[in-house]
Structures are given as C-alpha cells and as structure tokens.
Amino acid sequence: MVLRPPSHQASLRTTVCVVGSGPAGITCAMELARRGIAVMLVESGGETFQDEAQAMCDAELADARRHATMQDAVRRAFGGTSWLWGGRCIPFDPIDFEPRDYAPGTAWPIRYEELSPYYARACEYTNCGQPAFTLDRLAAESASRPITARFQPGDVIASDLERWSGEPNFARRYRDWFEREPSVQLLLGATCVDIEPSGDREHVASIVVARGAARTRIVADHFVLACGGLEATRLLLNVNARHGDRLGNRSGLLGRHYMGHISGKIASVRFDSEAARTIYHFERDAQGFYARRRFTVPARVQREQQLLNTAMWLDNHPPADPAHGNGILSFAYLALCTPVISRYLAPPAIAKLVANASARKDRGAHVRNVCKDLAKIATFVPPFVYRRYFARPRLPGFFLPSPNNVYALHYHAEQLPSRESRVTLAETADCHGMRRLRIDLRYQHADADSVVRCHALLDRHLRKTGAGRLEYWMPEAERVDAVLAQAADGFHQIGTARMAAHWRDGVVDPRCRVFGTDNLYVASSAVFPSSGQANPTLTIVALSARIADDIAAQLARPNASDAASDTANDTENRNDARMPNDMPTDATPVADRNPPSVEPIDEPVAVATAGAPR
Ligand SMILES: Cc1cc2nc3c(=O)[nH]c(=O)nc-3n(C[C@H](O)[C@H](O)[C@H](O)COP(=O)(O)OP(=O)(O)OC[C@H]3O[C@@H](n4cnc5c(N)ncnc54)[C@H](O)[C@@H]3O)c2cc1C
C-alpha cells in the first residue's frame, strides 16, 4: 500500500527498510513482502517523472565525452531507471567471477554457482521469459539453424542469447501489486539523507529521510540501499563524511574502480552465403518473449588469448549515414532528430546516440531515401508501432535484413577496474545539502586492445570456416584509438562499492552487507567487482533476490544473533572493520524486533539534518 504519513510525523518503524524503488529495490521488497515480512520501500521520486526530484541526481562530469549526463542515465521516480532502460537481459558468465591474472582485481568473492540459482527469479521480475540463454534451450523454430550458412562454433560461438524484457517498466508492471500488498508500504517523495549507526556498535539503527523540509527517522532491523549504482555510492560517501568512514570505507575504496562497458562499432561483417538465410533478427520463444544471438568468445579461448569478456552482434547500418539507402532507417533517423517525436520513440540517451552519430548527416539524402521507400515504410510502420507500443511482450526494436548480407557489427565488452576511474564528492550540493558526485570514468588501453583482438579473432574464424569476413571502417593502426574515442558509458554503473572477502579489499562483504555493519546491505551493480560482457540489470535483480533470502533467513532464526549466523570468516572481517570502542552486536531475538507491519513510533524524535557540503 502507498503510505501517506502526515508530514510532521518524525519517526516510523518497520522490519526491513529498502531505499530506492528501481529494479533492485522493487525485487528486494517484493521478495520479502511475499514472505509476510514488513517492508517499507522508500523512494525519493514520485509516481512519475518530476524535475525537482530528478535534479537531485545531477553530477559534475570530469569528461563529458566519457559519461552520459545523470539526466539521461537515471530516473528518480517509482520504478527508477527502468523508465529508461532498453530491457536487454543477460546473465554474467562463470569466467566473470573467476580470478584471471591478465585481468587483475576482477575476481568476485563468491562463485557463479552461488548466484546462478537466482537468475530464474530475476527472469521473472524482469519479465524476460525462461532463464534459457543458449540456443539449444530456445524453443523457436529457427533455433536449429546457424546464424549464417557455414558458420560453425569454434574460437567464436553464436549460440549465446540475450533476452528482452516483455514489460521493461517496473513501475507499470508492479504498481498495482504495491497498492494491494499489505506487508509492504511505499513511501514516495522521501529521500534518504542519513544513515545512523547505533552508538558505537556495528548495527545501523535508523535512516533519516527528507520529505520536503521535514525529516523522518525510519527505524528497522535491516536496511537495503537500492538507490542505483552511483546514487548508493554517493549516499554512502556523504554519510561516511559525517561518520568517519565507518560505513564500508575503511579501505578507502568507496567510489573507486568505476566501470561501465566499452561499446561501439569499428567494422561490418560480410557473410559469404545466401542473404535470406542469415538470422539477423529477433527470435521468439514459446511464450513469445524476444531473444537474439550474440557472438561470444568461449572462456577457454579468452584465457588462452588473454581477452576480456566480449560480445558482438549484428546491427543495422548506422541510421545517420544516408549511404545505407534505406528509407526505413532514414525515416527512423529523421524521427529521432525531431525532439517532440523522439521523446516517444526512445530514451533521450539512445535518441542522442543515433542523432549525433558522427556519420554524414545529409538531411536531403535522408528525405530522398524516404521518398524512394514510401511503400515499404507504409507497410513497416503500423505493425511495428502495434508490437512496440501495444503488444506484450513488447518488441524491443527493429533490425532490417541486408540484401547484400553485410551488417554493422556492434561490440559490448568488459572494462577493467582501475583505482583512478572513480567518483568523489563535489563541492556542490543538492536541495537537501547532499554533496553531488564528481564523475571521472576512465578507460584503459587494455580495454580497447582486447576489443580489437576480439574482432581479429572473429575475422579469422569467419574466414577459416568460409562463413564470411570483417570489413573494418579504419586501418589497423587506428583501431585501438577508434575504440577508445567512442568509449563512453554512465548507463551501467558498476564497481564503486565493490564486493570483497575482506574489508581491506572492498566496501561490501560476500552477502552484500556494508563492511563495518551487520544489517546494512547494498543491492546494486555498485557491488560488482567485474563488469563482464553482460548488461547489469539481470544480475542486479538476482543479487537483490539473494539479499532478500539472506535477510529472511536471519529473521527466521529467532534465537540466533546475527553474528552467530555468520561464517567465522565473515565475523572476523566484519569485527576487524569496527571502529575503536566497538560494542558487542545487538543480541535481541530478531523475532522480538519484527512487528507484523509498519507502525509509527509515538514519541517524537529530534532528527539531525543532513550536513552541508564541506
Ligand atoms: C538508456 C538506458 C538504457 C539501459 N539499457 C539497459 C539494458 O538494456 N539492460 C540492462 O541490463 N541495463 C540497462 N540499463 C541500466 C539499467 O537501467 C540499470 O542497471 C537499472 O535500472 C539499475 O537498477 P537499480 O534498481 O539498481 O537502480 P535504479 O533503477 O536507478 O533505481 C534507483 C532508485 O533509487 C531512488 N533513489 C536514489 N537515491 C535515493 C535516495 N537517496 N533516497 C531514496 N530513493 C533514492 C531513485 O529515485 C530510483 O528510483 C540502461 C540504462 C539506461 C539509462
């Protein structure tokens, strides 16, 4: 139910308080509430977009070419950035979790097998169908055919799938559920501005939320920060500035190792077979969910050739370049360049990417393409509009067949972590006095070098099997620079609160609990130690479901203190991370602290306001 406490109410109590209602927060809250656990879901934004709420996320960019503006990269509203995301769902690969000497600092302290069972639930929450991410598990008529005639698996395979969300907007999909569900209370327009440790202990007692000018304290047994990859880190940085780095930043790593992906195009692929047999398009499973094939490099080959994890897929010719001669692409390009129309067609970041593409922008040539293909456009647009905007599962986009069997090749690859790629607190602050972020996302030569070597690998493989070849868009000597020149992200916000086995190496422990606390979790891509080739949201959602399981397990053990439920190693690391004069953990039976639903606390509480920027 949506909670509307009077603005003067100074304190609320619940069992689990989840901060942020994007995919991470919604998943965690629903997982807990479905077990009857009282949850308060605290969201800074309203039901839909509001300028004032959105402005709180604004950040300073060290290099605007490398990072999207926060206006384009996140949404402050119920549903979070699922208002903007494309809906591409891909699990991480086992190799992303494993140590690789050529990719230092990327190993996770948990194994793939510890997370993989959660991908099934993540597929349900993201609404992308069955957790079937390989061609042999796709129940589609086309699944038995290779991507193009003569293509065989080898150093590169084309049998890994991306799946697409049938309803990517979490607000639309789950709003009614939150209205109905009695165990969960949704507090909109409430921005978390402080986290209050309990005296000298490692337990977080409460958080403070700003609701307009008023401040409300929320007391809970467990807290989950699900504010997004950068905003969770920003909140922790602000809070640590007040609490002496005791919340996960004794390592000094909070904000460091910022990663996204390295993504773009440097080549086309030309297949040497019958064009009509190339599978360039979406395939649909038995339930109608959309999936698409990707070129990937098997783990063995990655290790042998010291390659970072990379995926590539067939794409349309860049729409901005009228040389494609295709009326539908020109029509799409012109529509995306028209501000009022583009708002309904694509998220601002995607529209900008297409409209600002560096290719020649000769509008006259685009108009000529459109006029030539009017009949094609007339038959293409109505079914596309229906499938994209009215049907569910939603059509994720469109890919057009190439009569000469030549496709642009899009790469999406792992970025290595680097201490110098980081976010810090800026001197400027938002309306609640929370210091903004200064974002300095940096790519390394090794990131781009691996992308270029993956292209060479695919080219060799296509030639060897007689399936085709790559046609590069620039000479060999310029390729690494070309990849670095187009390297930019901000949409996938990875690594700034990294997970580690020991507090010296990270910000959260393997259970996603902030080091130095026993009940403060981070549910976000901020905790990923590596970026992999996959987009992050499916893994964010899987981790959120795992956090909910962890909390539920603790609440179900009424006689065990939280400390007793830890492994010896966890306890040692956590205690090791305590500040001087730490007290023992709270041994009150959890069941006694677990009220059946959210309840206001009667006594008024004086709540400190958030600190001003320093
Ligand atoms: C254009 C675009 C395309 C994308 N495409 C894909 C894709 O195809 N596949 C993919 O996997 N990922 C994609 N992403 C990334 C994806 O959107 C994010 O990974 C995902 O939304 C992260 O979910 P989250 O819940 O962690 O954070 P968010 O969705 O950002 O939600 C965070 C929530 O916390 C709230 N909040 C923030 N601070 C506070 C606070 N202090 N107090 C209270 N509430 C707060 C926010 O208002 C927001 O509702 C894309 C992103 C963009 C911008």
Image (tube, helix red, strand yellow):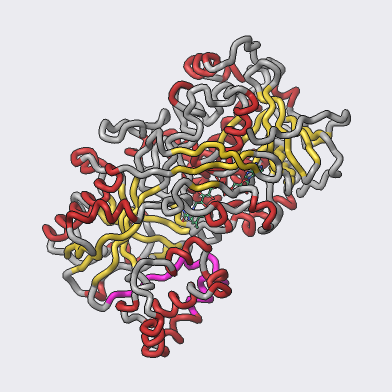
Q: Is residue 2 left or right of residue 391?
A: right
Asked if residue 400 is among those painted magenta in the image, a careful observer would answer: yes
The secondary structure that dominates the magenta segment is loop
The quarter of the displayed image where residue 153 is located: bottom left
Q: Nearer the viewer, residue 333 or 572?
A: 333
Residue at 49 percent of width and 79 percent of height: 383
Q: Position of residue 498 (x, y in %)?
A: 46, 33
Residue at 52 percent of width and 61 percent of height: 166
Asked if residue 23 is among those painted magenta in the image, a careful observer would answer: no
The quarter of the displayed image where residue 486 is located: bottom left
Region in magenta: 383-402
Residue at 50 percent of width and 17 percent of height: 573
Q: Nearer the viewer, residue 3 or 117?
A: 3
The quarter of the displayed image where residue 408 is located: bottom left
Location of the C terminus by quadrant is top right
Q: Position of residue 300 (x, y in %)?
A: 22, 40
Q: Is residue 338 above or below residue 120?
A: below
Q: Is residue 374 above or below residue 184?
A: below
Q: Is residue 172 left or right of residue 277?
A: right
Q: Position of residue 378 (x, y in %)?
A: 46, 86
Residue at 70 percent of width and 43 percent of height: 191
Any part of residue 93 in sight: yes
Any part of residue 131 in sight: no
Q: Is residue 144 left or right of residue 537?
A: left
Q: Position of residue 391 (x, y in %)?
A: 55, 70
Q: Nearer the viewer, residue 472 or 161?
A: 472
Q: Is residue 300 above or below residue 592?
A: below
Q: How many marks?
A: 0
